[in-house]
Image (cartoon, grey):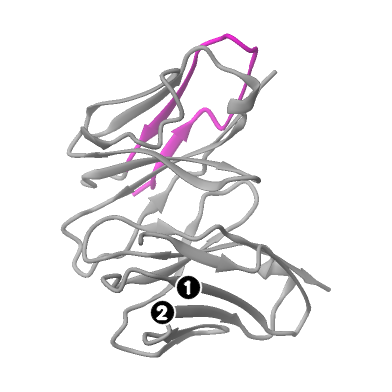
Amino acid sequence: QQQVKQSPQSLIVQKGGISIINCAYENTAFDYFPWYQQFPGKGPALLIAIRPDVSEKKEGRFTISFNKSAKQFSLHIMDSQPGDSATYFCAASNAGNMLTFGGGTRLMVKP
Amino acid sequence: DAGVIQSPRHEVTEMGQEVTLRCKPISGHDYLFWYRQTMMRGLELLIYFNNNVPIDDSGMPEDRFSAKMPNASFSTLKIQPSEPRDSAVYFCASSLSSDRPFYGYTFGSGTRLTVV
């Protein structure tokens, strides 16, 4: 019930392409869905987040799409750059102070 | 604020030795989390504290692992005795429960532990 399933585990995209990472959840009480970005040697850092009252949130080249009925949300990185190469984690929280993390996706953007 | 501060950044120790990892959360944050990250298992929650009190330690692998939070500004994760399979990156994170809406955690830069 508390799981968040993330796919794919790894992703290779050419520079300028679109990177798409998907997450699915079961707990309908989740009400906050952040994405974290982690560079090598660093801790995960909050990248962008969405709440279920909207279906999409965009910040620069990063967009979260949220499908409440399907219990899925995804991160889209437009015009992917080599500097976007990192590990991305989706997460979810249910009105509290606890995050449940997905398994992570290692993104490599080739020049 | 300097963020969540972890020390040491890297630790290499021999099997059987005691290892202590340290964390200073963001001032005023009342939740503190310890995570372990490996390629095989991703991010695993080991234990978390609320107002210095351990709330859930069900993620602690075994009795060799222990964690303390003697005050609001300091926490330790101890492994005794250490084993090669404990090699991983250990992260500390903190958050503020009164943040509404909730904004998530702030992670430290981690401690890379290698047990040889």
Please tell me whether residue B108 is drawn above or below residue A23 in the rendered image: above
Image quadrant where residue B112 sits:
top right
Magenta region, residue range: B1-25
- SS of the residue under disc 1: strand
Residue A18 x %, y %? 68, 84
- Contact between marks 1 and 2 (CB within 8 A): the answer is yes
Residue B50 or residue A42, whichever sits in front: B50
Give the letter of the chain under mark 2: A
Q: Position of residue A39 (x, y in %)?
A: 62, 56
Helix, strand or loop under label 2: loop
Residue at image position (53%, 84%) is: A60
Residue A71 numbered mark, or none = 2
Q: Is residue A35 magenta?
A: no
Residue in front for this viewpoint, B7 or A8:
A8
Amino acid at circle 2? Lys
Residue in view at x 52 percent, y 27 percent:
B8
Q: Specify the subunit that label 1 lies on.
A: A
- Extreme-bottom residue of the structure: A55
Going 37% across and 85% down the picture, which residue do you hit? A68
Among the two numbered marks 1 and 2 on one chain, the one whose residue lies closer to the N terminus: 1
In the image, B103 versus B64, the foreground residue is B64
Q: CA distance from mark 1 to mark 2?
A: 6 Å
> In which quadrant of the rendered image does the C terminus of chain B lie?
top right
The amino acid sitting under disc 1 is: Ala
- For disc 2, the neighbor class at 10 Å (few under 14, some 14 to 19, many from 20) is some
Q: Give the numbered dot on residue A24.
A: 1
Q: Residue at coordinates 62% horizontally, 46% vertically from top-left? A: A41
B2 left or right of A40 in image: left
User: Would you place residue A2 above or below residue B10 in this image?
Assistant: below
